[in-house]
Structures are given as C-alpha cells and as structure tokens.
Image (tube, rainbow, N blue to C red):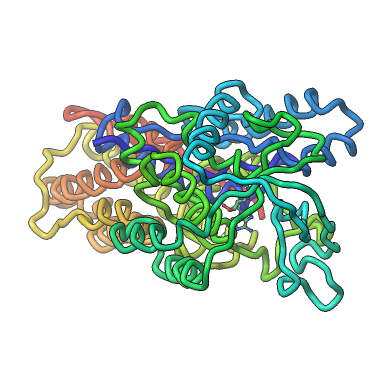
C-alpha cells in the first residue's frame, strides 16, 4: 500500500500564518504516522505554492518587484517557513514550474479532446480575493463580496467553458461509491446538496489576464487559476501506485473546488478521481477572525522560536477537533506548554531518569511490564481516521497516568527501605515511557530523539535532559 498526502498549495500574496500552518502540520502528522507504519518509501507528502493568480500580480506590484523576482523570493519564504517548523514534505511544487505547466497542458488537452470545453460569451462578477465568480445572491447588502468587503469586477468576454453540468450524475455516483471522497460527514453533505442543486458549466479562461498559463489550443487565453492549481496534485504525483492512495487535506473553504470541480476534471480526462479528501475547520484567534487589519495574525515562526516546534504542533492540533471550527488563544497555548508539555511530559521523563540514576546507578530496571499496564491501542485507529486531537489526548492521558503512578508509589521514598520494590515501580514506568516515545515519533518529532536517548537501552538509561525549558508568558 502507498499513501500520497497533499496540502492545498497556498497563495503567495502573503507569508504563512498559523491557519496555513494548521493544515500543513495536520498533513505532516498523517505523513509521519504512515511512514512509521508503511516505511518511508511508501509515503509521499506534497505541499507548494499557487502562483498563477491575480493576487500574485497585485502583491508583486505592491512590493515594487518584477513578478518573477517576487515569486522567487516569496515561494522561498514559504518553503523556508515549513523547514523552520519541521514539516517533512517530500516535494514542494510551484505552479510556475515547467513540470506543472506541462501537466496542465496534458490534462487540458484531454478534457478538450473529450468534448468538454466550448467557447461562449461570459458575463459575470469576479472576486479576485476569492479567485472565483460570484452570483448576485452571494453579495452582501452593499453589493460587496462578504469575505473580502470589495465589489466584484464585472467581466464580459469570450471565455472557454468546462461542461461541469455534464458531471452532475457521475459525481453523485462517485460519492455513493466512495465514502472517503470528502469527510467529515458535514462537509460531504454540504457538497452533495450543492451537486444535487444543479451544476452549471464554469468559465475556465480569461482573455485579458496578465499572468497565468496559456491554454494549449488558444495562447491568447490564460487558464483560470483554480483550473490550473488543482492539477498540481498530478504534476508532482510520484506514480500511479501513489495516486491510488492519494489523500487531499484541505480547509472547509475550498471543498467545492476539490470535491466537485476536481473530480469532474479528472473524470473528463480519464484519470481516477481522488481516493480520499478531508476538510478541516477554521479557527479564530481569541474569538476573532484572523486579519491584517485587526493585527491578530500570528506567525508560526515566532511561536516556534519561543516555544519550540513540538509546542506549535501540540498547541494548534489539540486546540479543537480536526474537522470542526474552533478557537486558538495565546494564553491557552502557553498553558498547554507549561502544564502538559513542560509540567507533564518533560517532568515525567526527567523525574524517572533522575531517580533511576540516583537509586539504580542508571541501570535499566528489568522490564517486567506490570500486569495492569495496557498501552493505548486506539492511538493508531485515531490517526487512521483523522482524529488527531484524540490521538494527542491519548498521549497526554498516558503521561498523566505515568505521573500519577509515580506520585502514588513514591519510589524515591520506597528506595530507601525496599530497593527491589522501587526497582519494580521503575520497571513498570519504563514501558510507559517507551510507549510515549513511540507516540512522540509521530506527534513530537523534535522531542522524540531526546526521549529515545533518555530511555537508553536494555542496560542503561540515558542522561536526564530538560525536554521543555521554562518559557515566560
Ligand atoms: O485557497 N483556520 O490558498 P490559501 C484554519 N490557493 N485553516 C486556515 C485558516 C484558518 N483561520 N486560514 C487559512 C487557497 N487556512 C488556494 C488553494 S489548492 C489546489 C489551491 C488554511 O492560501 C485552510 O487549509 O487561501 C485553507 O483551505 C487554506 O489555508 C487556504 O489557503
């Protein structure tokens, strides 16, 4: 079995914030889990940047740089950010790369040859913020896009259209055959009712666009950014065996593109539709939407520099259920760090290893697993069903269980009167620490090697280390 995980490719009109980071970290967690289970060579993880957009043109103009230079620099920033926070991507795609343009041309030619593209007059409202056409009914009372608070552009031109309407029934059939094509259920139902409501053909080219990939059969037209962007997943696909195990992770804002337009494009081109898609929710920061104007945009790099990579992961991924909307607050984040990471995991490992050095001269206690010890077996199941927060909760409850065992048995007192009894306590704790270390390989990849080192080998435990140093609020 092979697994191919993708994140959305992000727009480059701005640098990454913790919203993009949330999706990327979740995808990274799945990739790490499956690598551990199937072997590194059987998992492929793709992320990248979506560059052929009108937003790019505007951002480049604002920066005063030529567009190529702007793109070079900003895509580098995205890549560097993922490196700084420890994202284990196998490939990073930019939609201005040759390999992508080539795949776009191949797929568009197939769709064209299938008779699913025609030319017609287009009249409509286009919002650059959304990079999408809006209907009058989508607008607010001022005639503005409700998300971007700006009047959409009126567009009237000859465009090429994709016969999306033809795929209404095939898409419904696809959904009924594949329960994994978009989860959770709530998102799936939304998309299903959208499809049942009737699909209209969509415009896929712009005659007057300044920037973008030209249509293979009519160079005068640039391809609509979403029609090119979705194809990135094929441009970087390492092989058909990986395609069979593809899983797109995305936010709830872009499900119609991924679960309606994308599978229809693939059906038309004679390519298998995606095996799996999962749409996570959106979070607010202290109850407010993250926005530049509110000044509450949080940088993942700042948080990592202060608290470390694993704290950022745990803070974001445990804040609320993966698949639901939620809230993130810096206070909550700090508390999690202080109580669960430093006070929980860090304290546990440090205490146990220090005590073993003190009373057993660092000798690994004979690992008799206590009869009452059951490692949390649901962990794997959680990660295989996208329940990341539950997986993290299992980890922390195991930490609590081990800390409680330590506090109840007080081996530091016991060792003075009954050393073999104290040794038995340590022998029960070590397998718990080993289980936590196994889980950490997926959840806390930066701390994992330190935990492993502290556990040592069958003869001796390692040196104690501070896993999560004190951080001031
Ligand atoms: O839509 N909470 O890119 P994008 C949670 N280029 N997730 C958030 C978030 C928040 N507050 N804000 C953003 C695009 N996200 C297209 C994708 S794919 C072929 C093309 C995440 O830069 C969430 O995953 O606008 C969302 O789907 C994604 O960022 C949108 O990133």
Give above or below for 200 relative to 454.
below
Q: Residue at x 52, y 69 (%)?
A: 198
**Given the current orientation, which residue lies at the most extreme bottom position?**
141
Q: Residue at x 46, y 63 (%)?
A: 323
Q: Position of residue 38 (x, y in %)?
A: 25, 35
Q: Left or right: 463 with respect to 415?
A: right
Q: Position of residue 262 (x, y in %)?
A: 50, 48
**Split into 4 quadrants, where in the image is the N terminus?**
top left
- In this orientation, which residue lies closer to the viewer: 455 or 221? 221
Q: Position of residue 339 (x, y in %)?
A: 49, 59
- In this orientation, which residue lies closer to the viewer: 140 or 323? 140
Q: Left or right: 86 with respect to 299?
A: left
Q: Left or right: 85 with respect to 330?
A: left
Residue 350 visible somewhere in the drawing: no
Residue 36 visible somewhere in the drawing: yes
Give above or below for 350 relative to 377.
above
Q: Residue at x 51, y 73 (%)?
A: 197
Q: Position of residue 393 (x, y in %)?
A: 37, 60
Give above or below for 246 relative to 461.
below
- Number of labels in the image equals 0
**Split into 4 quadrants, where in the image is the C terminus?**
bottom right
**Given the current orientation, which residue lies at the most extreme top position?**
98
- In this orientation, which residue lies closer to the viewer: 15 or 103? 103
Give above or below for 428 relative to 114.
below
- In this orientation, which residue lies closer to the viewer: 382 or 346? 382
């Amino acid at each position: 079995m092979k697994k191919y995980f993708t994140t959305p490719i992000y727009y480059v009109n701005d640098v990454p914030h913790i919203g993009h980071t949330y999706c990327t970290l979740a995808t990274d967690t799945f990739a790490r889990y499956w690598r551990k289970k199937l072997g590194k060579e059987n998992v492929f993880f793709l992320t990248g940047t979506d560059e052929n957009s009108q937003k790019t043109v505007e951002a480049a103009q604002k920066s005063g740089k030529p567009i190529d230079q702007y793109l070079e620099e900003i895509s580098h920033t995205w890549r560097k950010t993922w490196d700084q926070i420890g994202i284990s991507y196998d490939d990073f795609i930019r939609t201005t790369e040759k390999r992508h343009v080539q795949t776009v041309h191949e797929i568009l030619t197939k769709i064209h040859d299938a008779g699913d593209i025609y030319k017609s007059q287009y009249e409509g409202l286009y919002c650059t913020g959304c990079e999408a056409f809006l209907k009058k009914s989508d607008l607010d009372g001022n005639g503005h896009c409700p998300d971007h608070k700006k009047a959409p552009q009126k567009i009237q031109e000859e465009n090429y259209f994709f016969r999306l309407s033809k795929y209404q029934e095939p898409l419904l059939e696809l959904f009924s055959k594949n329960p994994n094509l978009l989860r959770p259920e709530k998102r799936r139902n939304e998309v299903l009712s959208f499809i049942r409501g009737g699909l209209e053909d969509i415009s896929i080219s712009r005659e007057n666009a300044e920037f973008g990939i030209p249509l293979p059969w009519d160079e005068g037209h640039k391809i609509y950014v979403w029609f090119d962007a979705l194809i990135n997943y094929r441009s970087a696909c390492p092989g058909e065996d990986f395609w069979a195990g593809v899983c797109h992770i995305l936010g709830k804002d872009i499900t119609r593109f991924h679960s309606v337009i994308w599978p229809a494009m693939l059906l038309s081109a004679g390519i298998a539709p995606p095996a799996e898609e999962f749409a996570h929710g959106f979070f607010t920061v202290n109850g407010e939407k993250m926005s530049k104007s509110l000044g509450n945009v949080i940088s993942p790099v700042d948080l990592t520099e202060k608290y470390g990579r694993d704290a950022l992961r745990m803070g974001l991924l445990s804040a609320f259920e993966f698949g639901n909307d939620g809230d993130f607050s810096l206070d909550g984040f700090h508390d999690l760090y202080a109580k669960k990471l430093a006070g929980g995991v860090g304290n546990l490992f440090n205490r146990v290893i220090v005590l073993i050095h003190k009373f057993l001269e660092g000798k690994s206690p004979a690992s008799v697993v206590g009869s009452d010890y059951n490692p949390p077996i649901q962990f794997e199941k959680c990660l295989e069903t996208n329940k990341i927060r539950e997986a993290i909760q299992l980890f922390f409850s195991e930490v609590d269980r081990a800390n409680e065992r330590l506090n109840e048995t007080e081996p530091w007192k016991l060792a003075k009167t009954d050393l073999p009894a104290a040794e038995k306590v340590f022998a029960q704790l070590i397998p718990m620490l080993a289980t936590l270390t196994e889980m950490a390989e997926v959840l806390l990849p930066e701390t994992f090697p330190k935990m492993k080192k502290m556990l040592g080998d069958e003869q001796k435990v390692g040196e104690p280390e501070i896993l999560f140093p004190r951080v001031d609020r």
